[in-house]
Image (cartoon, helix red, strand yellow):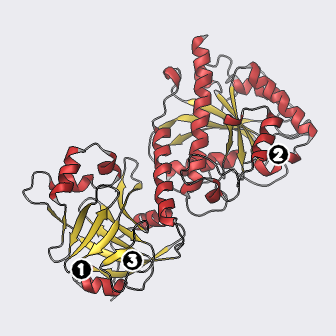
Amino acid sequence: MAVTTRLTWNEERSFQKLLGNVSLRLLCKSSVHGDDIAEMQNRCRCQGSTITVIYHSDSIFGIFMLGHSSEQSKSFIEPDASFFFSLQKDETMEMKSVFLNSTVTSNSKSLIFNFSSYDNKFLSLNFSKRCINIPRSLKEKLRAKSDSNFSKKGGIMFLEAELRGKSDSDSPYLECEVFRVEGIKDETGYINRITRATQHRNSLLADVRAYSPFANLVSEIRILLLGPVGSGKSSFFNSVKSIFQGHLTRQAIVGSDVTSITEQYRIYSIKDGKNGQSLPFMLCDSMGLDENEGVGLCVDDIPHILKGCVPDRYEFSPHKPITPKHPTFITSPSLKDRIHCVAFVFDINSMDNLSSKMMVKFKQIQKEVINCGVAQVALLTKVKNCNEVLQDNFLKMNKAMISQSQIQNANRRLGIPLSRILVVENYASEREMDPLKDILILSALKQMFRAADDFLEDLHLE
């Protein structure tokens, strides 16, 4: 009879999203193979990278170990080659990962998680008693810092809550399973990179969720995406939505035709999770710009879009701009209907190939944006090798990967400040999410929020 895991499909996908394009093979299951730690170690030796998963009553946690476990030593793994994790569902019912740098040791009865990054505190998994043990010193730290990043982001708060009020520090677990991780990258610094990348990505995600437009002048800001055909406007919306849905989505139609795939004006709201609340921003997708007259988005439509006169799903006509006589024209738009930030979207690899005709059209549109007082940013898409674009701290871009000449060229040609030239790599043919891509996309969103707030603040002062 085949041994099966307790992991659900969604939980297994959470591991795959965390670690990349990997597969999990069950090596050991305590309810089947017994609660003998020596037997577990024997089954896991020379198996490569592993994940040990402990099922608690209301959470899943454990340890990821990069590389083979030791043949001789009682130490499973060296520092910086493993991390403690916890998978928990948030209000959107999505599985979220939290981390704590750790090492793993063992004795005849227990598997011990050492949190060297936090005063060498640890918790242990007692196989003979089938329970989790938190030493008094760690328990006191948890209670003293119940609101700290250690307890919340470290994913141990649920254990402290389970043990509260008990005379001892033992909490029973339901099951322990060990998986071999197949297809994992085995390279120096990989653990540090994926844990820090995911933590930084989650921090940015929290910032975006917590955003509130300046002085609450509007409940949602509107960001208009403008750019040449094929620059990645619709793909950017799809990428943003994918991040908040937790999986890849293709709501906006994208393509590589020479003419614009998008023919309607679309005002997209973004929900936080499948059934979550709408986030405080909207992305407005438009027809692509074309260098030729009578093709692509009509420049005369721009002022009406900026002022909020164009309704959702309006069908663009390259030859005939919308007028106040149109049956759906919004004659008295409010501040919430207006555009608060324009993102000019360009393929970073095509900036040098923009024709003089396209630049003339762009300058016309930019003049309309400036006349309306709307904030503007440049969004450069199709960045290659985003895993190499970000430096280790994920706060600055590596100048070697995105040359200063490309950014400065965009600054010179578009007349947009360097601080508001943003770079992203949209999701295209991928099947799984990538925290590094998410970092660039969420960072770009934050800068757009700041630009929109500048516009609202100027309006407020007026």
Q: Is 42 placed above or below 74 here? A: below
* Residue occupying image coordinates x 40% and y 55%: 96
State which tag comes first along the sequence, 1 or 3: 1
Mark 1 or 2: in front is 2
Sooner in the amino-acid sequence: mark 2 or mark 3 = 3
Left or right: 155 as drawn, with respect to 260: left
> Residue at left 89%, top 32%?
360
Q: Residue at x 25, y 79 (%)?
A: 30
Residue under label 2, please give it: 351
Residue at disc 3, secondary structure: strand
Residue 225 rendering spot, x and y as whole percentages: 70, 38
Label 1 amino acid? Ser
Amino acid carrying mark 3 in the image: Phe
- In the picture, the quarter occupied by the N terminus is bottom left
> What is the CA distance from the residue labelled 1 to the residue labelled 3?
15 Å
| Outermost residue to the left | 167
Q: Quick one: 234 or 118, which is closer to the camera? A: 118
Mark 3 is surrounded, within 10 Å at the Cα level, by few (under 14), some (14 to 19) or many (20 or more) other residues, namely: many
Q: Residue at x 38, y 68 (%)?
A: 8
The foreground one among 1 and 384 is 384
The numbered mark at residue 179 is 3
User: Could you say which quadrant of the image residue 180 lies in?
Assistant: bottom left
The Cα–Cα distance between marks 1 and 2, rounded to whole angstroms, is 60 Å
> Is residue 33 shown to the viewer in this render?
no
Does 439 appear above or below 318?
below
Mark 1 and mark 3 residues within 8 Å of each other at the beta carbon: no
Q: For numbered disc 1, what is the local secondary structure? A: helix
Which residue is the site of mark 1? 31
Quick one: SS at disc 2? helix
